[in-house]
Amino acid sequence: MITETALTLLARFLSGVSVRWVDCQPDTCQRVYFANHTSHIDVILVWSALPYRVRRLTRPVAAKDYWSKGWIRPRLAKVYNAMLIDRKAIKVHQSPIQLMLDQMGHEFSVILFPEGGRQSGERVGEFKSGLYYLAKKRPDLELVPVYLNNMNRVLPREEYLPVPLLSSCTFGPPIWLEDGEGKNDFLARARDAVMKLSRFDVDEE
């Protein structure tokens, strides 16, 4: 608990993050928070932006091959109760989506980055199909878009020392997979839901 609090405060200090909830409120119902991805500390930032009562029921999804390396990454993953998914051991009856659903049960929410990897600029990349299959298997889950602004400048790709800057984390209104909606249409709509949140940063400038 002490380590969690200290790291959360450190992440907020370095990012100078402001948190907004737009047509959405913090809730302990099961959700999938899906965000754009530009920095190593995106996972920590979205997770730490949630109120404690929500945070304790929310698990970031992270790549096992990255977060299992070295001394500090596995410890950080444990502090944040991360759900480590092995991308290299995919089997017919053990897909990453099913592993995720098994660990979520009917209690935990998750944080996902559907682009599948960090982007180098402000652009939001095309979404991978995981979010679609998750929504298809659990249509009851609220899918909450999250837009992170300026995080790529706090800790860019290939850099390991964060630079203190002002950034923002905006949570938007939930979406769901609609009846008969195809994969490509759904993923485009989900990506658009994230990009629309960027205008709240522009409006404040």
Image (cartoon, rainbow, N blue to C red):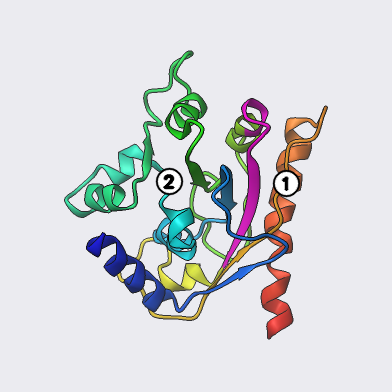
For the point 78% across and 30% down, the residue is 182
Q: Amino acid at mark 2?
A: Arg
The residue that label 1 is drawn on is 175
**Which is more N-terminal, label 1 or label 2?**
2
- Seen as rendered, the residue at the extreme right is 180
As measured in the structure, the alpha-carbon distance from the residue carrying label 2 to the one carrying label 1 is: 20 Å
Look at 47% across and 34% down and name the residue there: 104
Determine the secondary structure under disc 2: strand
Please tell me whether residue 37 is drawn above or below residue 188 in the rendered image. Answer: below
- SS of the residue at dot 1? loop
User: Does residue 160 appear in this view?
Assistant: no
Considering every residue shown, the one lying at the far top of the view is 92
Most foreground residue, 182 or 33:
33
Q: Is residue 16 left or right of residue 78?
A: right
User: Which residue is tagged 2?
Assistant: 59
Q: Is residue 143 left or right of residue 199?
A: left
Decide which of 64, 146 is in the foreground and name it. Answer: 146
Residue at 58% from the left image edge and 59% from the top image edge: 26
Characterize the local packing of mark 2: few (<14), some (14-19) or many (20 or more) Cα atoms within 10 angstroms. Answer: many
Q: Is residue 40 left or right of residue 107?
A: left
Q: Is residue 143 magenta-colored?
A: yes
How packed is label 1: few (under 14 Cα within 10 Å), some, or many (20 or more)?
Answer: some
Q: How many marks?
A: 2
Q: Quadrant of residue 25?
A: bottom right
Residue 97 at x, y = what percent? 51, 28
Q: Is residue 66 visible?
A: yes
Q: Is residue 103 magenta?
A: no
Q: Which residues are magenta?
A: 135-148
